[in-house]
Structures are given as C-alpha cells and as structure tokens.
C-alpha cells in the first residue's frame, strides 16, 4: 500500500500537491483530511492543512508503469515528465518535455519498442497481462489523422489509375490504422508485403471494380 501525507494552505491545495508528486489523477487515491488548517490573524498564528492520501490498487499499477518508463527514459538519456492514467482499458503514459520527441524515433519505431518493453516488464512485476500505451505530446493522435488522410488520398489514386500503391515501412499499429480506414471501401483492399521492419502495406484495387 502506498500512502503519503501532504500539507498545504487548504486541504484542496494539499491534495493537489500530493497528486502532482504521485503523478496520479484524483480518482486513484483515498483522501483523509487530518487538519483543516487556519488562516490566523494578520498573517500570524496560521496553521497549514494536512491530508493523507492512500493510493488504490489501480493507482499503484499506474505508479509502477510511470516509474518503469521514467527509469527507461533515464537510461536512454531522455529528460521528460511522465503522466499516467487509465484510458479505454489501457495504462496510458503521456510523455512531455523539451527532449520528449527523441522517444518517437523514425516512423514511431522507438516509441513502439519502448511501449513493448514497458508492457513486458509490467507483465512480470504485476503478474497479469497489462495493456500499455505510450504517447508523446499527442503524437499518436496527430499520426493517426495524417495516416487516415493519406489512406483516403491514396485509395482515391488507386481507384483512378487501377494500379496498386506500396506504402513506406510502418509499425503494426500504423498498418492497422490504414487497414481500418479502408476496410469499408469496396473498391480497394489492403495487403501486407515484406518482413520485419521492412513490412509494408499495399493498397490494391479490387478486381471487380477495375477499369476495363
């Protein structure tokens, strides 16, 4: 069990500071107010508020995930802040800071490798399968939007020319985005070619829709 005490001008201030130190959202702690605090008179005789925060089991998993990533970043020489929260069934770790962009790597390969490693470490430490997602200052959402726009543009090209298009090497997550955005288009289909880091996605015209 992880617990800590914190003082502040008011109980709310103390809780906010404790949450900042823990790197957790409010819903992952239980709060006990030990002292409400008092303003005093003319700036004298005031007393600080004091609270005790106890981290829930779900919060402890988030702390383990955050600390694991922070240690890996330190080994990589990357100075950055890490914020952890649960998001749609994932332990989501958001990385920010002046040098955080170094974590992304070419085509996002570095961030995917670090995400895989953090997930495997947590699996062993916690004893259950943990779904981890690491992002850097909104990189994944920007990347998703760019990939979706590119997929639609290339699909239009394939339908106009009747010729397949081979995309640049991508991570499995990026290939999945392309596949999902085009799976409802009856005039094209996606196929994978190559192996390992050179695995690429093709956008191919469906035979029944090719121009004569």
Image: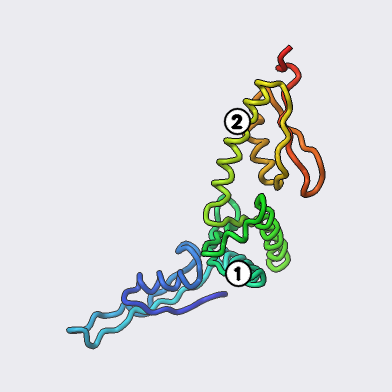
* Front in this rendered view, residue 163 or 53: 163
User: Position of 128 compared to 193: left or right?
Assistant: left
User: Position of 204 compared to 133: left or right?
Assistant: right
Q: Quadrant of residue 128?
A: bottom right
Name above or below for residue 172 compared with residue 179: below
Determine which residue is flagged by label 2.
153
Determine which residue is flagged by label 1.
70
Q: Residue at x 64, y 40 (%)?
A: 177
Badge count: 2
User: Position of 188 compared to 50: left or right?
Assistant: right
The picture places residue 190, in percent across and down from the top left corner, at 72, 32
Q: Do the residues labelled 2 and 1 touch (CB within 8 Å)?
A: no
| Mark 2 neighbour density, 10 Å: few (under 14) some (14–19) many (20 or more) | few
Q: Residue at x 38, y 79 (%)?
A: 7
Q: How far apart are marks 2 and 1 (CA)?
A: 39 Å
The picture places residue 140, in percent across and down from the top left corner, at 58, 49
Query: Residue lying farthest top?
Result: 212
Is tag 2's residue or tag 1's residue first in the polypeptide sequence?
1
Check disc 2 and report its element: helix, strand or loop. helix
Q: Which residue is drawn at 57% across and 69% down?
A: 79
Q: Residue at x 56, y 62 (%)?
A: 100
| Mark 1 neighbour density, 10 Å: few (under 14) some (14–19) many (20 or more) | some
* Front in this rendered view, residue 211 or 185: 211
Name above or below for residue 109 compared with residue 29: above
Image quarter in which the N terminus is found: bottom right
Check disc 1 and report its element: helix, strand or loop. helix
The picture places residue 24, in percent across and down from the top left corner, at 50, 65
């Amino acid at each position: 069990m992880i617990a800590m005490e914190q003082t502040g001008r008011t109980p709310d201030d103390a809780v906010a500071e404790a949450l900042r130190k823990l790197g957790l959202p409010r819903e992952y702690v239980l709060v006990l107010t030990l002292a409400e605090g008092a303003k005093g008179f003319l700036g004298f005789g005031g007393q600080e508020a004091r609270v005790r925060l106890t981290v829930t089991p779900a919060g402890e998993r988030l702390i383990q995930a955050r600390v694991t990533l922070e240690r890996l970043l330190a080994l990589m020489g990357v100075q950055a802040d890490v914020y952890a929260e649960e998001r749609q069934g994932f332990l989501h770790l958001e990385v920010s800071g002046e040098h955080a962009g170094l974590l992304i790597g070419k085509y996002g390969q570095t961030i995917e490798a670090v995400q895989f490693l953090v997930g495997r470490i947590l699996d062993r430490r916690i004893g259950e399968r943990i779904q981890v997602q690491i992002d850097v200052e909104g990189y994944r959402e920007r990347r998703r939007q760019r990939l979706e726009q590119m997929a639609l543009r290339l699909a239009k090209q394939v339908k106009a020319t009747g010729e397949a298009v081979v995309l640049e090497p991508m991570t499995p997550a990026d290939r999945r985005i392309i596949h999902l955005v085009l799976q409802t288009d009856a005039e094209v289909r996606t196929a994978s070619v190559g192996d390992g880091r050179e695995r690429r996605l093709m956008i191919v015209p469906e035979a029944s829709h090719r121009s004569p």
